[in-house]
Image (cartoon, helix red, strand yellow):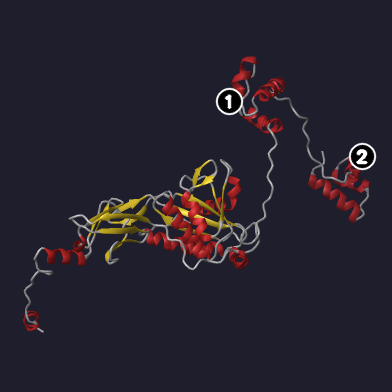
Amino acid sequence: MVGVQQWAELRREHFVRGVSIKELARRTGLSRNTIKRALRSGVPPRYERSPAGSKLDLFKDEIHRLLKEDAKLTGVRVREQIEPLGYDGGKTIIDDYLREVRPLLLPARTFQRTVYRPGEICQFDLWQPSREVLVGHGQTRLGYVVFAALGYSRVGAGALVFSKEAVDILWGMARCLRWIGAVPRVLVWDREGAMHAGGGRASDELAAFCGQLRCGWHLCDRGDCQAKGVVERLQGYAETNFERGRSFANQLDFQLQLDAWFEKANARTHRALRCRPIDRLADDVEAMIAAPERWPEPDRQQVLRVPVDAYVRVDTNDYSLDPRLVGRRVEVRVSQREVLAAALDTGELAARHERSFARHRTITALEHARALRALRGQPAEPEVQQRPIARYDALIGA
């Protein structure tokens, strides 16, 4: 048989250089008829083996019958059903055959390509990093990242939170939208527990949040993850590109690195768009709802009477209150950044603490400790003996 290289050489010698068939036969030792067939063939020669029979041929009708009864029958079960009939082959050829015939028996499922208009939607999702986040004092804590992705520009943003409660998720959403600088017309969520009130209805917290921003919302149908594929793809990219190979000193460092990563990710060329998401952001923002004068600041609130020990417990931590307000009612507001308390009757500040995400700590403000000592008739500061500077100069030989 003439190989591909020899076939190409024969055609080159005959058609380009004008070598006769007789001369080609003399040079190659091939018969003239073989050379003629090679010159007449416009396609390279190839070896074609006649298809051999498969061990599965005798059982295909039975496989078709089984699949008509249950089109999702697994390869393992198919093999168990046909082995008593005499099948002694392997599992691989069954799996290969099922991949060919199963789609013919399943209901056809198609998807349409979705094109988003500028400013139309922003998709949200919640991602759990694979490692707990350092929160100080030798402690770590399970964190979550609220992801946001604009449908038109594909610009993304993210915010770290430490619970799946509505108040924390909404705070993360507000932070992402504040970074974007405007409000999309529709906010899209899957049926996340804190966002979904059952039956496809939004929770009161989500509805109130959207009402403040004058935008709508959409909750995807159960199991319809394709409806928010934009943020799903962004989340998948973050899982492989952001977290791996990084270390974080604390939750603030995590957020700083996440913001820097998004600046880089939004400036990369998007494979589907063929341009950078950041270059389309201006068109997105122009078509969005204008940013509110004051963004929603979801926080936890409670009203209590200041106890005799003048502390309030927030998330397993005890924060000091002004001991001069013992017995009076104060409103405590807990945000992602601070714990703030104010007296209800006069509005005077009862406490302002930086919030700690470590657990089981007692946090006392210095002014509260001084006020307590004064109330107990003790000096605000311990008396410390003071020596003249000259005494120290004499000791060090200055």
Q: Would you place residue 251 above or below residue 226 in this image?
A: below
> Among all residues in the image, which is located at the extreme front?
345
Q: Nearer the viewer, residue 55 or 240?
A: 240
Q: Who's the residue at 44% across and 49% down the image? A: 128
Q: Position of residue 251 (x, y in %)?
A: 37, 58
Q: Does residue 379 appear left or right of residue 182 in this picture?
A: left
**Label 1: which secondary element:** helix
Q: Is residue 27 shown to the viewer in this render?
A: yes
Mark on residue 253?
A: none
Tag 2 residue: 33
Q: Who's the residue at 56% across and 66% down the image? A: 290
Q: Who's the residue at 43% across and 51% down the image? A: 166
* Tag 1: amino acid: Val
Tag 1 residue: 76
Q: Nearer the viewer, residue 213 or 283?
A: 213
- Give the label, 1 or 2, closer to the camera: 1
Q: Would you place residue 303 above or below residue 179 in this image?
A: above
User: Alpha-carbon distance for marks 1 and 2?
Assistant: 54 Å
Label 2: how many Cα within 10 Å (few below 14, some 14–19, many 20+):
few
* Tag 2: amino acid: Asn
Q: Does residue 318 appear left or right of residue 116 in this picture?
A: left
Q: Who's the residue at 39% across and 62% down the image? A: 253
Q: Is residue 239 shown to the viewer in this render?
A: no
**Label 2: which secondary element:** helix
Q: Nearer the viewer, residue 281 or 167?
A: 167
Q: Nearer the viewer, residue 239 or 294?
A: 294
